């Protein structure tokens, strides 16, 4: 019998895991002996992974993007050969990682999917001395994800982010940024930038799936240039919504490494959580770093 460690955040997604815990454990027990560990404080999931990864054959985590980020950080803190397969049961507000991996948003269904899954080697990003699962971003609206209260998220879901974002519109200002990739140097003023490995951002922005690979060792990056007037602002928003990769208002890049510099510290978000204020960041893609369990019916 396999030994399975189930780590979950009891407050994610209206605390729905609590009412589903019995079903989850019963389902997972069809594949092994299940040990349950709820998180009680920020950073617990990372500590659990680092401490117990050698004692189990499979780790399964449940929570929002923040919980998944903590688990990912724990994995990246141990040697690659020690990293066991990881399953994910989404229970947050947006769950972009689940969308990209074809994991059901229904707790019952995605738990069942874990019983018939395949290994998918997923790329993980490092951000200076931290890690992120699917996105590192700066500029307009990035602070919305971590300033929106949990209660507000629970009640309004994705709309909570939109409502909070509208409040930030008057504050949008351009940021002079220098972007160095492996091949080129770019300098301009931007109101927003994201380096990601996902098909969905915030459950709102959708990436073209034919242009995104989650295991190719490269990130997709989008930088939105600072509009000079209200007309350009509208054009920019339209181009973002329509995903016009050739837009004069947007800079689309693909690279395994980014070095980003600013004249002053700017706020970053990592997987929807506050990532810190920095003048310079180094972002690197760690190709196929973690073997996640992916539903077979989705490839």
Image: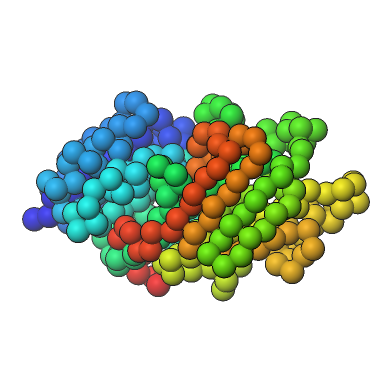
Q: Quadrant of the C terminus?
A: bottom left
Tell me: residue 274, above or below residue 6: above
Examine the image and state in which quarter residue 294 appears: bottom left
Tell me: residue 251, above or below residue 145: below
The residue shown at (60%, 46%) is 261
Q: Is residue 227 left or right of residue 7?
A: right
Task: Report how many numbered discs are placed on residues in the image.
Answer: 0
Examine the image and state in which quarter residue 12 appears: top left
Q: Is residue 175 left or right of residue 49?
A: right
In percent of width and height, residue 38 lies at 28, 32
In percent of width and height, residue 188 lies at 73, 52
The residue shown at (54%, 52%) is 259
Q: Nearer the viewer, residue 221 or 107?
A: 221
Q: Nearer the viewer, residue 258 or 97?
A: 258
* The residue positioned farthest toward the left in the image shown: 1
The residue shown at (46%, 46%) is 127
Examine the image and state in which quarter residue 266 appears: top right
Is any atom of residue 143 visible in this view?
Answer: no
Q: Quadrant of the N terminus?
A: bottom left
Is any atom of residue 269 visible in this view?
Answer: yes
In percent of width and height, residue 172 lies at 76, 37
Q: Is residue 116 left or right of residue 144?
A: left
The residue shown at (18%, 38%) is 51
- What color scheme is it? rainbow
In percent of width and height, residue 148 lies at 59, 30
């Amino acid at each position: 019998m396999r030994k399975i460690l189930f780590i979950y955040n009891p407050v994610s997604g209206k605390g729905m895991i609590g009412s589903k815990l019995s079903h989850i454990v019963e389902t997972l027990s069809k594949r092994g002996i299940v040990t349950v560990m709820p998180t009680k404080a920020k950073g617990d999931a990372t500590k659990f992974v680092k401490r117990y990864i050698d004692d189990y054959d499979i780790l399964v985590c449940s929570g929002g993007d923040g919980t998944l980020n903590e688990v990912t950080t724990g994995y990246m803190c141990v040697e690659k050969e020690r990293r066991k397969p990881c399953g994910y049961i989404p229970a947050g507000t947006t769950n972009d990682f689940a969308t990209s991996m074809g994991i059901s948003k229904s707790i019952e269904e995605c738990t069942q999917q874990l019983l018939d899954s395949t290994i998918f080697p997923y790329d993980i990003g490092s951000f200076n001395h931290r890690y992120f699962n699917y996105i590192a971003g700066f500029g307009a609206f990035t602070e919305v994800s971590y300033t929106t209260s949990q209660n507000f998220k629970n009640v309004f879901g994705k709309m909570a982010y939109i409502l909070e974002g509208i409040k930030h519109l008057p504050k949008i200002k351009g940021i002079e940024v220098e972007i160095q990739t492996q091949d080129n140097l770019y300098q301009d003023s931007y109101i927003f930038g994201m380096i990601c490995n996902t098909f969905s951002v915030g459950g709102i922005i959708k990436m073209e799936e034919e242009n995104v690979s989650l295991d190719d060792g490269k990130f997709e990056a989008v930088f939105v240039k600072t509009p000079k007037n209200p007309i350009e602002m509208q054009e920019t928003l339209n181009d973002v919504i329509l995903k016009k990769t050739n837009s004069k208002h947007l800079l689309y890049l693909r690279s395994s490494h980014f070095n980003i510099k600013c004249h002053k510290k700017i706020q970053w978000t990592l997987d929807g959580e506050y990532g810190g204020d920095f003048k310079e960041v180094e972002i690197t893609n760690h190709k196929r770093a973690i073997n996640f369990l992916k539903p077979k019916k989705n490839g």
